[in-house]
Image: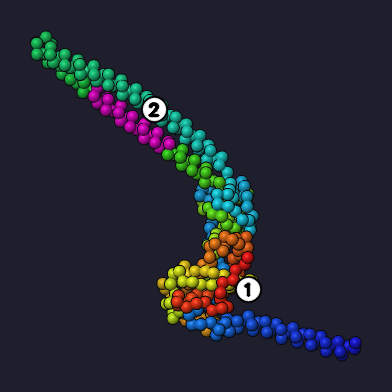
Amino acid sequence: MTIKSTLKSLSTIAAVIILGGGGWYVWQTQQPALLSEQLPESVAYGNGRIEATEYDIATKLPGRLIEVLAQEGDMVEAGQTLAVIDTDDLNAQLREANAGLRVATESRKYALAIVEQHKSELTFAETELRRSVALLKQGHISKEVVDQQRTSAATAQAALKAANVKVVQSDAEIDAAQARIERLHSNIADSTLKAPISGRILYRLAEPGEVLGSGGKVFSLLDLTDVYMSIYLPTAQAGKVTIGSEARIVIDAIAQYTLPAKVTFVSAQAQFTPKSVETRNERDKLMFRVKVKLDSKLLNDHIEQVKTGVPGLAYVLLAPEQNWPMQLQVRVPE
């Protein structure tokens, strides 16, 4: 083969590649426009990305991480331990609180003993007073002695009241000590970070040895049973959408499937379409955000395959009495 023919062949191949790439680009960019011409007016659509409800796994109290037990991408179960924070200081506070409870308990016993003592003293003082009053009537003792007995009885009664107050104070100290113990037990339990739901670890944000403040994030966790796509529809279409309206989602990565979904949210306020959402000629119009959620049973059946961030299209049936067109009939993976 000559150099001239070789160059000609290469030019032909390059032209085919360019034309093929250009065709693919045009098909990708024009696909929604072409599809909209094929859809009935009872179906609205928009593009977006698959999202999932995200949970932040964070510390309740400041402390040093001693274990981080999950990696990004791991599937975890509800209640599974994900990280552990050092609790040496909390354990020391707990021992101190238990000691305080014992002191308060013994103080109450002492206060009760003092109450019994003052009860006896009051009983004796009241008995002496009654005797003195009787003797005074008979003229055997002076009024001064009776007054002294009356003062002794009043003093004993006041001492008894003070002793009862001390018992109440001891009860309060016991309650405070028990509350502190309960709080420390709760804080120690909260130092073991557990998954609130079953899902997938999206980000691991801290490593063992790091000291985190209160609310320090350790993981981001995705709820793969709550997966949705947000699209933006113009006023004319959004006004026909209701919560519970049937919907379909077609994901670019698996465009051979049409996934069942429901509308779970329709914005009550209009807004300009975010720049990240491609709506072409609707760019400058006020739009309403519509949240389309994938079927939960389908997600549970294929939870290992669920991915977020992938782009796709969501379709909403605006007229419940109408049927879905053939190209949007449900087709799900086996």
Is 212 located above or below residue 136 in the figure?
Answer: below
- Picture coordinates of residue 61, whole percent (x, y): 51, 48
Residue 177 vs residue 202, the one in the foreground: 202
CA–CA distance in space, label 2 to label 1: 77 Å
- Picture coordinates of residue 277, whole percent (x, y): 54, 76
Q: Residues within 10 Å of mark 2 (few under 14, many from 20)?
A: some
Dot label at residue 256: 1
Dot label at residue 107: 2
Which residue is at a point 83% across and 87% down the rendered structure image? 9
Q: Mark 2 or mark 1, which is nearer to you? A: 1
- Picture coordinates of residue 12, whole percent (x, y): 79, 88
Three-letter amino acid code of the residue under disc 2: Ser
- Picture coordinates of residue 175, whole percent (x, y): 39, 36
Residues drawn in magenta: 156-178
Which residue is at a point 47% across and 67% down the rendered structure image? 264
Three-letter amino acid code of the residue under disc 1: Gln
| Label 2 or label 1, whichever comes before in sequence order | 2
The overriding secondary structure of the stretch rendered in magenta is helix
* Left or right, 93 with reference to 115: right
SS at circle 2:
helix
